[in-house]
Image (spheres, grey):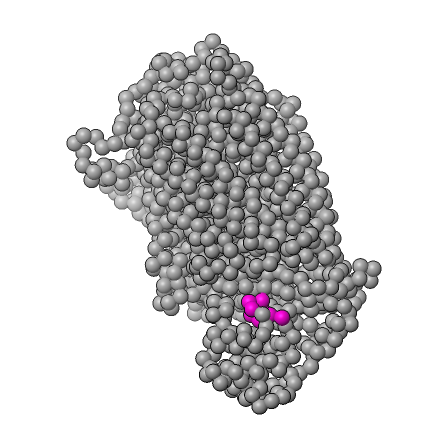
Amino acid sequence: MTTRAGANIRLCRCFILAILGLARASGQTSSPTSIFAPASTPAKSIYGFSLFVLAVTAVIFAVVCGMLIYAAVKFRSRSGEDQKEPLQIYGSDQLELAWTVIPVLIVIVLFMTSARIIHAVQDARMPAGTIEVTVIGHQFWWEYQYPQYGFVTANELHVPVSDPSHPTPTFLRLLSADTDHSFWIPRLAGKTDLIPNHPNNTWIDPHETGTYLGQCAQYCGTQHAKMLLRAVVESRADFDRWVSDQRQKANEAPDAQAEEGRRVFNSTACINCHKVSGSVANGLFGPDLTHLMGRETIGSGAAQNNAANLRAWIQNPAAIKPGVLMPSMKLTDKELDAVTAYMLTLR
Amino acid sequence: MASESVPISGSIHLERESGRTWLETLHEWVITVDHKKLGLMYIGLALLFLVIGGIEAMVMRLQLAVPHAQFVSPEVFNRMFTMHGTTMIFFVAMPVMFGFGVYLVPLMIGTRDMAFPRLNAWGFWITAFGGLLLYFSFIGGDGLYGAGGAPDVGWWAYAPLTSPAFSKGHSTDYWTIALLVAGFGSVATAVNLVATVLSMRCPGMTLGKMPLLVWMYLVMGGMVLFTITPLTAAQMMLMVDRYLGGHFFDTQAGGSAVMWMHFFWIFGHPEVYVLIIPTFAFISEIVPVFSRKPIFGYPIMVAATVGIGFVSMSVWAHHMYTVGMASYSNAFFVLTTLSVGIPTGIKIFNWLGTMWGGKIRYSTPMMFAVGFLFQFLIAGLTGIMLGAAPFDWQLGGSYFVVAHFHYVIVGGILFSLFGAFYYWYPKMTGRLLDETLGKWHFWLFLIGFHLTFDFMHIPGLLGMPRRIYTYEPGRGWEVWNLIVSIGAIVQTIGTLCFVFNLIWSYFRGKKAGNDPWDAWTLEWSVASPPPVYNFATLPDVKSRRPLWDIKHPEDPDWKYE
Amino acid sequence: MSAMPAALTPEWTLPSRGRIGMYCLIAAEAAIFTIFVVAYLFYIGKSVNGPMPRDVLEVPVFYTVCLLSSSIVIHFAERALERGQLGSFKILWFLTFALGAIFLVGTGFEWRHLIEHGLTISTNLFGTTYYSLVGLHALHVSVGLIGFLIVIAFSLAAKVTEAHSPQISVFALYWHFVDAVWVVVFTVVYIVGLRA
């Protein structure tokens, strides 16, 4: 029977090693949010450190696990053996000392390496040329302010790629308008929380262009699950082009339906929450819509940004993201078509 | 077995005595101050809430088995994870630990009852009331605003999500008051445990001769006095904010959300040690008996436990590595967190040392104990990973943490509890739990546990945060979530075996006698179940294993200790 | 095997469970007060609007003297009971109660003064932390006063004798704790809080 105990234990070990192996593998292949595929200095520092920690704990596991298996199997009572009690040992001071000193040394090593990485990431100096973004967490969307360029956008963060030899990192100041949130894009950095009345900061310097995914990592209410993050890392040229686009006010509506949509938008409660630069809409509670069509998703990642989803969202946001704070506007079908057409002009 | 030389002083039946109505029996249990009955009631309460908490877990796992499932709404899911956590910690783990404590400690120290029997009863009933109040929220939580139901703020109830602005209706109030009230019960029972251990030991049982379980309940009781009370204070402050217009955690008025976190985790981290120390107590009783050797290094085990008690009060902010503390603060908590692993690791080595050179008998209690040792080792190692702050910046708040703490609580605490059930059920009821059913329970639960909680680490490593009612496809999380959910079903089946065993064996189990395991502590010297007065006469206590001395007069412990 | 006869057992004394129980209760209550004190200290100077402590607080010297001297009086009451001087005990016990009651009345006057000057629990961080901390202490004083009254009732019925000294001492521990907490609260609110 006890060989089954030993087999079960060996099975456990295989599980753990398989997990680590699979994690490494999956990090390199399919998951866009794996912590094992870092693309930015903070994430890379953590990754290197995590390999060290995993190695130390794997060695501890192998040694102790091995001894446990050995004891569990070797010292089991066998049937047919005499019923005398084994030698009664009460302890051993030398062993106690040994298995106290060795863990103390391991703790010291792990502490020193942790402290080094903590300092390197948290206390890093930002070079000249750093992009500054103020991130404000809302229930359940992200506001991005670019004070250096004087515009505000929402839900998609654009940053320039950073060349390791001449870094142009992005420094993110983290604030909250309501409850606690947490900014987590695993491939770019560890997570940092956004807490009202408690400004935080973090930084990223992505080394490869692309779109990086993440999501809010601190429970913030009903739709915490769909407060998704998208960071678009682009070449410097593309980034500058994006910045100048974002600084433009909204274009004039090109056709009658969009013009009608703008009229409906500006005369209903929409403007209480939303801002469209260059129009009377000046609300700050909801996302800035001036360049809505530049984003791939709506509802902070809840749905793809296309005409059908836009219309469905405006008609009843709760159908796509139940618990979202935007109410259904109760517009007629004609008004819905018009407003959607207006939205589609906001590039 | 040496039961012939140990006095057995009468017995009492838990079944209805002839001539008593069920109403009289019910009355007896409701008004009782007997520590054994109260212990059983605590354990019964915990088992009831274990089933309810398990159902809440199953609801969540069914929702998360596939991405974008529509099994439950986000509102319901958020209530499920809040209630699951709150129930499991406050109405399963705490009551079951107190239950075993108040049952066993007087028996192990050779006394008649706890120091304060009426306080013991009060502690139980107010805990039960707290549980009732918490669950009343499902029907009563719809305040005047129609926004309510059970609490949905997470079991940590972070501010300002719990402020009146973001938590309308009364659901949060049910959370706050139910736990406040249950907390008073916990403190009362802790006072009782400390006073019992210090003031009620039988002659000859010095502190150095108490069973390790008694030492560990002494430390646990002392810890509860300083652990639950910060939460009590914080909950009072939350009530001031919600009902009297106070601003303790009102960020609009300059209040601090981080202060709630500090207060909560000053409770929350030592709390998990409050739960694990009785676990260690069970293992420290079971492993020696089934290895047929005394515990290896008793004095170090005591020192390590006391050390854990103190050091664990200094580690709390490892739950707050991501809130923006200064780098030296983060580093300090890394040091204390890793340090608490040292006495914990020492204990694993001592249990290993106990098994080493023994003659291990693999009855069901020992199987669960060995399972505990492996799983607790792994849980401790993932804890070390999370204790290293930079790693936690990625893994904190993710399913890696959920996997870690369930590894401790289910793989560690629950496995040890199952072992304790199989070990002491015969003493409590007079009948052994069925060994075959026990082995079915063990293997089913082991397989289910590993399916769920081994694979749960992976979505965390791949970026899946916790407390989300659904998740996006294409992030590599789908297959792991499905396996995790399947494992939950297997665990449920295993638990059903256990519940069936508890009931079936009560009526049909083999009679146990007073000492079925050939053990060495005082509870095994009385009948099973013990008479209401526990001891008619006490064996001579000259060592840590009084019954060993009786059974082995040629080689007693007191010659070597 | 029976227990060894009393003549052969060495004396086996353990601490009194009442005292241990009260020490444990005091430890738990001290932890609760500590959290409120920490909140008070942390929020000093952080209120976003007035009134501020300097604007409205008056240091309650007389009432503090009353409360702290009640610790001395209760000590003499305990000694009196131990010596069997039941008459002195009743007087000293009642005097302790009276001093505590004066303190509580004083707190009431102070709060009335503060409310008249615009400070309530919901006014600002100072109001919230002040009323919570002082109020929690006043609650513990009130519980103590109820305990005093119960003992007074029993002693008037001639039920309290020197055999009850241990229980009276255990209760006195609670009262000393209440006074000690006031020393801390006084320092934090009227010294540290007023300096900042």
Residue B532 location (% of width, % of height): 29, 28
Image quarter for residue A150? bottom right
Q: Looking at the figure, which quarter contains the C terminus of chain A? A: bottom right
Q: Up-down: is A102 above or below B123? A: above
Q: Up-down: is A69 above or below B389? A: above
Q: Nearer the viewer, residue B195 or B341?
A: B341
Q: How many marks?
A: 0
Q: Residue drawn 48% across and 22% down?
A: B361
Left or right for C179, reference B399: left
Q: Main secondary structure of the magenta part?
A: loop
Residue C157 location (% of width, % of height): 23, 41
Residue B445 location (% of width, % of height): 46, 38
Residue B138 location (% of width, % of height): 36, 57
Left or right for A290, reference B546: right
Q: Is residue B201 magenta?
A: no
Most extreme residue toward the right is: A165
Q: Residue drawn 37% across and 67% down?
A: B146
Most extreme residue toward the bottom is: A256
Most extreme residue toward the left is: B19
Question: Is residue B249 visible in the rendered structure shown here?
Answer: no
Image quarter for residue C85? top left
Image quarter for residue A263? bottom right
Q: Is residue A298 magenta?
A: yes
Which residues, given as a range, are shown in magenta?
A296-303
Q: Nearer the viewer, residue B24 or C152?
A: B24
Q: Residue drawn 76% across and 60% down?
A: A207
Question: Is residue B362 visible in the rendered structure shown here?
Answer: yes
Q: Residue drawn 53% across and 41% down?
A: B450
